[in-house]
Image (cartoon, rainbow, N blue to C red):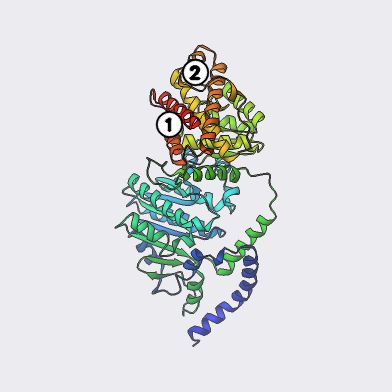
Amino acid sequence: MASTANLRSRRSIAQLHALAGVEREIRAQDSHSRRKYLREFNEAFHSYDSLLDSQAIQLALHAADVVLIGDYHALPGAQRYAASLIEERALTGDRPVVLGVETIFARDQHILDEWWRREIDETELRQRIRFDIDWGYDWSPFYELLVAARDHGDAIYGLDCMPRENLRKIGARDRHAAAKLAEIRERHPEAVILVLFGESHLAPGHLPAVLQKQMPGTRILTVLQNIDALYWRAAGERVDKVDAVRVNDDVVCVFNATPLEKYESYRLFLDQWSRCDTGPDFAPTIYNLIDSLAAFLEINRYSPHNGTQPKFLVDMLPEVHGNSSDAMLRRLLSRKGISDLQLKVMLATVEERGSAYLPQLNAFCIREFQMMHAAEDAARFLHHACRGLPQRQNGQGLNRNNGAGVSSALTADAFYTQVVEHAVAYFGSRVLYPARPAPESEEDGVLSRAACEKAAQAAIRADQNKFESIARVWGYRIGSRMYAAYLAGRVKPGGLRRLFLAHLDRPGLARKVCTAVIARVRSASRG
């Protein structure tokens, strides 16, 4: 009888030969495999305790509270296997089933919820979560997974956050996913949570360790798929086919594809991506502006608590509609109760400025990148995000001015709120784009509390357009003085962050904030 070594060699030699060329081509296009995080995964699983049959796998699944399923993104079978586990686990009926996925950003949960409620179709879901741009793998098997979860489960959640392409931040993504899973456990205390996440995240010291620390006492099972070293080792077993192996008490590995199949599928995607010819993708530019301004303000994008930091800013990042048709924007806005007049104003703003931030949707509409206006819009978003984005939570537009709508009441609170919003937006745009000229009204009048109150009274007595024009003029003037004070070293990023975090919706607070800012910049000017 052939020895284990001979069996392994005979079963593997042709695959290994074919695989060598594929791996060389992959390494030429993708150098990430040399990163420490990926090396830790590749070095983690080289042996197993025993072979498993399908019944043993089911027993292991039923004993777990959280099942972490390793995903090789380029392999459709990996997503289809996860879909089969959802169906099999739900059929027992002993516990509800909830799915969490890396593929969808947590910031896009509201889009996923709309699809879950059947308010939007498959095409809109795919476009709005930017699947092809931000993910780029096969849509069909992933959508089959979502449908299986909607048909058999209680909920689906997006778990990931930016930046995906920066492996230096990959540990932060693990911590973020663990925090999201802890929140899901609180919402669904009786459910078993199945999680499909990239296989490299499932090394013992990566997501599983962070999750165990976040949720002590939780029974966590890691289900790997087609790990190379385990596959080659199992090739030496004296059975025709090994379905799965138990690595240890908390980890199993199933085999539903060969290494050659895996890496050929990835090579094909690399080739496809290299030949991709699409229009400009504005989202990375917008996110980079937001990220840069947040870093300037010393904002921790991954903070799990409100207070001096916004909670999980990475989950509030806006949608960016670059080449969306007017028809899609009309559908999006109509679901939020935006009138045709407001839509007309918004489209005119985009035509004039190239972009607009829509707080009603927490979305950017951008047709042409103009740095000055895009920087201002990025600052507007960050200001809304620091205050909690209430418009996303209640589904109602706030009617704040940025060409996206009009104020519903010409009150002093509304005026001072708009002044502060314009001030921080202008200031942020100067931080990101110092070449922006000072506002034309800079030399007009005196910047004082009394003058601002006089302007507020005049605005309240005027019509809507005049109201907004006066608020913008005063906001830009104050923002310009803030920037001058910052350049002079009179104000610090920490103090400015507190301004971004001020909740202006409380009656009278916007006026107090505006008055305090005016006093501060006047004092800085005298200094």
Q: Which mark is residue 370?
A: none
Residue 262 image-quadrant placement: bottom right
Please rate how many residues cluster around mark 2, counting C-alpha atoms within 10 Å: few if below 14, some from 14 to 19, many from 20: few
Q: Is residue 406 above or below residue 189?
A: above
Q: Which residue is mark 1?
A: 394
> From this viewpoint, which residue is outermost toward the left?
217
Q: Is residue 362 visible?
A: no
How many callouts does the rendering have?
2
The kind of residue tagged 1 is Asn
Q: Secondary structure at mark 1?
A: helix
Residue at x 38% of width, y 52% of height? 193
| Camera-side mark, 1 or 2 | 2
The kind of residue tagged 2 is Ala
Q: Is residue 122 above or below residue 466?
A: below
Residue 67 is left or right of residue 485, and the answer is left
Q: Is residue 192 visible?
A: yes
Q: Which residue is mark 2?
A: 451
Residue 486 horizontal/vertical position (percent): 51, 37
Residue 47 image-quadrant placement: bottom left
Q: Is residue 371 above or below residue 405?
A: below
